[in-house]
Image (spheres, rainbow, N blue to C red):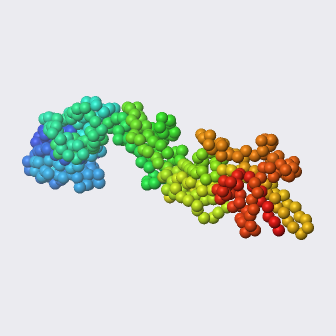
Amino acid sequence: MSLTVSLLVLLFISGVVAQDGWGVDYKDKSICALKGSTVTMRCTYTYPSGQFVQKAFWTKQWGRGSESADLLDDPDYRGRVQYLGDKQHDCTLRLRNVRETDQSIYYFRFLTDQSQGNYEGAGGVNLSVTDLQVEVPERVIEGDEVTLTCKTSFSLSDRPTFTWYRNGHPLSSSTDQLHLQLVSREDADRYRCAVLGLRSPEVTLNVRYGPKSVSVSISPSGEIVEGRSVTLTCSSDANPPVEYNWIKGTSSVGKGETYTMMEISSVDSGEYKCRSSNEHGEKLSEALTLNVLYPPKSVSVSISPSGETAEGSSVNLTCSSDANPPVQNYTWFKEGGSSPVGSGHSYRAPQRGSYYCEAQNEHGSQKSAAVTVKGVWNSALYAVIGVTAGCGCLSIIIAVFCVRRKRRGSSADDKNQTQNVDPNAKDDTNTALDPVSRTSDDVYNTLATVHSSPSDDLYSALDPQSRSPEYGTLATVRNKH
């Protein structure tokens, strides 16, 4: 047994030096292959004449004789390895779709019809496998000059031609480096290189830059009515990601990509902007104007002129309110009535009383508080009615006293037309009209006698415009039974 092993070792050694006609000649002692490529291991072999080769194969196992595993039978190589040689002198092998696990030393072995015709070529072929890689700088900022390099773990022989691809489209560069001048965010694409028909994996150029294209959107879109929920969303283009701050006018009101206002009100109307910022800069969005619509509020009525007014003078009532959109309809009512008495922003009150207005737009309505229009007669009348009964007859004595009204800018003639009552009369008007404190002579000295028929209207008798001047401003009406 030991003799057989020694003989085999001797045969292996003799194969190396090709003694006695035995030998294997590997054309390429070392091969560097790209991952995914096809490798051809060329070789020739010799043996003594008079012998015939029965089996020829490649293996990764050295020194195990006939027990060496044939690559053709290895599941890891099935379908990828092909023996191109013959059983005479050519021992070329082809390996397709080279993998990183294929990196190893490969040996050629053949067997002849002789009992001692088992021979394996020493040294073998050393296969190294590498992958193409695109090397990019770790940190690229917009405006930098950048160089991309196509690299392998070893130097490729014969200075092959490189091809560069950007997003799958070939570029003009034919060397192992690709130069980009003043990179921008548009250069942040996918790159790969290729050599000898093999392509590297794609890499993405990561270009860092400050915020751009900052904008604000609103949801829901369309009209914004008071009481609803509204969300503002800020978006921008930046690398790395940004922080968002919300600004209304000149005040900061929130942070984050979105800003939500629950039950929005009229005070939320205004211009909103968002500030987008990262380590490379910041930028403000254009202003978004938020216009909140709401029904009338703070409805009120003003009077012109204010205070008491003389009978027959005009009194203007004006209705005002806060609403968006502005009030479309103003309706006037007199307190105690159910039907409108007027419309429009202003209303001229024809008589004394309490009035209010109702303001309305498309989102609702509101009523004002009532205001009272006060007035006095041109000649204020005070009456003291004495009622006496006796002997089957009823006498009503009405004493009417006219209080003289001062008129601004009145002429001397107007003053002369005003009759004086009694020069000795007291200044107190109520006392002058009190029948208890006045004697019958006092009363009759200050009253003109007016005879009226039973059909005369009492109020007509008291109306200074319906009476002729000779009756003066004071009258006593005697009504006989």
User: Is residue 117 among the parts visible in the rendering?
Assistant: no
Nearer the observer, 100 or 396: 396
Q: Is residue 469 above or below residue 455?
A: above
At a point 18% along the width and 44% down the height, the residue shown is: 170
Quarter of the rendering containing residue 235: top left
Closer to the camera in the image, 138 or 341: 341
Query: Where in the figure is residue 49, as x and y percent of width and height?
Result: 8, 48
On the image, the x and y values in percent for residue 223 come to: 46, 54
Quadrant for residue 137, please give it.
top left
Q: Find the residue positioned furthest to the right.
A: 391
Can residue 219 be seen here? The reply is yes
- In the foreground, 142 or 5: 142
Q: Is residue 399 left or right of residue 214?
A: right
Q: Is residue 133 left or right of residue 451?
A: left
- Left or right, 443 with respect to 273, comes to right
Residue at screen point 58% across, 51% down: 314
Q: Say which quadrant the C terminus sits in.
A: bottom right
Q: Give whichever of 256, 355 is nearer the camera.
A: 355
Q: Is residue 9 above or below residue 448?
A: above
What is the number of callouts on the image? 0
**Residue 4, position as x, y percentages in the image:** 25, 44
The residue positioned 66% from the left and 50% from the top of the image is: 378
